[in-house]
Amino acid sequence: MKPDEITTEPTDEDRELSGQMVLPMLERLRRVLTRREISLGYLASIIFACIRGALCIVWYRVTRKNVVIRFPFMVYAPVKILGPGSVYIDKECSVFYNCFEGLTIVTLSPETWVSIGKGCDLGGLTVRCRDSVVFGDKVMTASCLVQDVMLVSTCDGTGKVMSMAESINGRRIVIGDHAWLCASSSVLQGAVLRQGTVMSAGSSISGGESKGNDVVIGNPAKRMIPIDKLLRLKGTLHERRHSAAAGQVLSDEMPAAGQAHRHRQKL
Amino acid sequence: MKCRLLGRHIAIGRNFRMYAPLHIGGRGAVSLGDNCQVGRIVGSPHKYTWIDALCPDSRISIGNNARLHAARITAKYEVTIGDDVIIEDAGIVDTDFHSLDTSRGEPLGECSEECRISIGNRVCIGAQSIITKGVVIGDGVVVAPSAVVSRSVKPNHFAYGNPVVSTAREDSHG
């Protein structure tokens, strides 16, 4: 195929010839691929993740009664769901690698339940719970720990539960919609993160409660700064910097034109 | 089992159970009490329990009914752990290993009296926490996951955070 044919739009004759639904779609896909909007490798990885997710759904549907995962479930990293409790993962969730870890959910008693909302990006998340953990919609996580008990090993069934450890029960963790848990943060027992909370990197919250739309900072978390305030603070800094560097306007057209030229050369 | 008993001062009590690999290294003395148990945390990638007594003089003694779940205990001087202890995926280190100047040689000003760690009875230490040198943890303490214990904790307290903050436990019963 000549390079001219790839880049040009399909003519009317071609459209008449195809006359079906599939061929225009293929044509569009081909155009998308040839224009390098999505690379072929990326598309292949998406399809592979989708298939892997479907296999994961089927596997847990067959082997475990109380684990329900809704389609589509994109799996780029290993998913481990262990323990006797029930798990519900809503549709459009995806699992990524983060710090070489995928998604790990460990439930420690039959009454335990974990529910994860729609469209969550779960990368390197570890959930260990005895009571319950509730995630809202569109939660983003980096490699972090969500644990609603102090000690996990008291209930793993390998030995006798000690009297003292028995008294340390789990308390429910609630994580609201659009929350973002940064790398190596930990959410411990009884924490309630309302809508739009950001756990900063390395922070840890246990038993606290956020008002919503604020940033949780520190280990242990002492301060919660509202995001509006933080943005205002950053905005003023930005303005000051920009006023200092006024006059230097970057043109977006030049690099784009260069790229297009390079693409043509490649083809 | 990676425990090489030859030529070492290792004493393990009766009824010792091992559900995960245990590594005992170094030249020092290590003693475990009766009914000890070594395991791992479910769903965690860490499975080895490491007990390292680095020097010939160093001593690690662990009491009865201890449960070590992927714990890492390293001693240059002395680590004493009481009875009925649960340690999971935590690091206990009684030395800094290196000095602060750029030679990174032996740490200066460390002595056995200041650096030894002692942990009381009925202590629970959560995952990903670290216990540094010279710390004395009293009886019945609960250390939260991901805490860094750099100062001593009183008996029947709940320790959390980095650096550690301790509050009295509400549900303490001796």
Image (spheres, coloured by chain):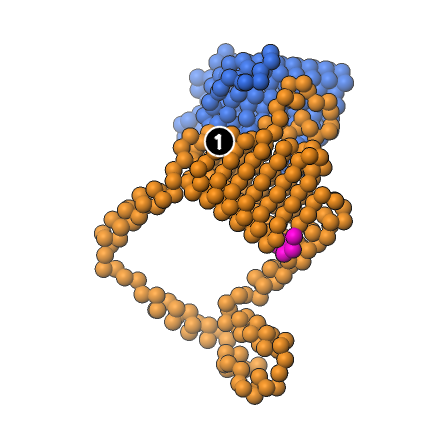
Chain colours: A orange, B blue
Crowd tier of the residue under label 1, counting other residues whose Cα lies within 10 Å: few below 14, some 14–19, many 20 or above: some
Residue at coordinates 76% horizontally, 46% vertically from top-left?
Answer: A63
Q: Which residues are magenta?
A: A70-74
Q: Is residue B147 visible?
A: yes
- Which quadrant: the N terminus of chain A? bottom right
**Picture quadrant where residue A126 is located:** top right
Mark 1 chain: A
Q: Position of residue B39 (x, y in %)?
A: 69, 28
Pointer 1: what residue?
A: A208
Q: Amino acid at mark 1?
A: Gly
Q: Nearer the viewer, residue A220 or B90?
A: A220
Residue at coordinates 59% horizontally, 74% vertically from top-left?
Answer: A25
Q: Position of residue B62 (x, y in %)?
A: 64, 16
Is A121 located above or below residue A131 in the figure? below
Please identify the dominant SS of the magenta region: loop
Residue at coordinates 55% horizontally, 74% vertically from top-left?
Answer: A28
Is A73 a magenta residue? yes
Q: Nearer the viewer, residue A70 or B166?
A: A70
Is B38 located above or below residue A83 in the figure? above
Q: Nearer the viewer, residue B72 or A26?
A: A26
